[in-house]
Amino acid sequence: MKAFVFPGQGAQFVGMGKQLYDNSQLAHDLFETANDVLGFRITDLMFEGTEEDLRQTKVTQPAIFLHSVILAKTLGQEFRPDMTAGHSLGEFSALAAAGALSFEQALNLVAIRARAMQKACEANPSTMAAVLALPNETVEQICDTIDDIVAPANYNCPGQVVISGTLSGIDAACEKMLAAGAKRALKLKVGGAFHSPLMEPAREELAKAINDAQFAAPICPVYQNVDALPHTDPAEIKANLIAQLTAPVRWTQTIQNMVADGLTEVVELGPGKVLQGLVKKIAPDVATSGME
């Protein structure tokens, strides 16, 4: 069985999507539609901007979404996965590509999500850190011992968990992780504590927009971050998407569940090869490839 998977924030690069724009009339038209929906020419920033431009959450998230979903749209009948999933932001790409949301509605939700997250980051200075070579349970237990807000944010692959929290909380947690035997506890260059309770203001803002949006049943099961399980019911998909902002991304568990359900091949659609690398670490027997 084949899955298409979609990357999240961090996979962006200057020039992303330019080849699609130049070589496909459908892609060109969708990118121009996106410029109109967003109210600014995101294509200029994607194709010719600076790395600094692309690092702004309000630009990064729509840019990665557009690259991923427009690529999927250009595949036409070739886009026939048995299952699909996305990492964090990539879940919106997965839902749009699988027909659960229209292109315009999904892009609008991504733009609202990005702005709300950026606002939450500015209101509460916070960060994230990657913890390597500790069991999930140990990471969770240490997070629970910290007085400040610190929580697991991404279960990326066995031995790699990203934690989110306040600046002082992450510093304290990193010290304890290293003392407990972590190979590394490395602070990331991000603007906030994504997938933690500190994103609650953003979750509330996004919840209203998600509840107002029209969702349909996708063409195949979408494995969602919150519970790592397949979903096709629009009401369930909505509820899980709302919960996603303050809950961890269970990527390891998602791939493991897909394998249990018959997964043999993963195709990553969008910028970078991060998810292919993670899949190889989670399920070495699964074939991986990508399209940019």
Image (tube, rainbow, N blue to C red):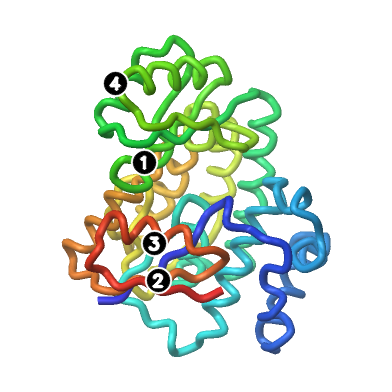
Where is 33 relative to 132, above or below? below
Between residues 251 and 280, which one lies in front from this camera angle?
A: 280
Q: Are marks 3 and 4 in contact (CB under 8 Å)?
A: no
Residue beneath the point at 40% across and 59% down: 277
Q: Amino acid at mark 3?
A: Ala
Dot 4 alpha-carbon crowd within 10 angstroms: few under 14, some 14 to 19, many 20 or more: few
Q: Amino acid at mark 1?
A: Gln
Residue beneath the point at 56% across and 71% down: 69
What is the spatial separation of the Cα atoms under label 3 and label 2, in whole angstroms? 7 Å
What is the spatial separation of the Cα atoms under label 1 and label 4, in whole angstroms? 15 Å
Q: Looking at the rendered structure, which numbered label has been put on residue 160? A: 1
Dot 3 alpha-carbon crowd within 10 angstroms: few under 14, some 14 to 19, many 20 or more: many
Q: Nearer the viewer, mark 1 or mark 4?
A: 1
What is the spatial separation of the Cα atoms under label 4 and label 2, in whole angstroms? 33 Å
Q: Residue furthest top?
A: 147
Dot 2 alpha-carbon crowd within 10 angstroms: few under 14, some 14 to 19, many 20 or more: many
Q: Amino acid at mark 4?
A: Gln
The earlier-in-sequence mark between 3 and 2 is 2
Instruction: Give the labeled residue for mark 4.
Output: 141
Instruction: Give the labeled residue for mark 3.
Output: 85
Q: Nearer the viewer, mark 3 or mark 4?
A: 4
Where is 215 relative to 207, above or below? below
Q: Looking at the rendered structure, which numbered label has been put on residue 4? A: 2
Mark 3 element type: strand
Mark 4 element type: helix
The earlier-in-sequence mark between 1 and 4 is 4
Between residues 235 and 124, which one lies in front from this camera angle?
A: 124
Between residues 24 and 221, which one lies in front from this camera angle?
A: 24
- Across and down, in percent, residue 125 comes to 65, 24
Residue beneath the point at 31% across and 20% down: 180
Say if residue 199 shows up in the picture. no
| Residue 198 found in image quarter | top right
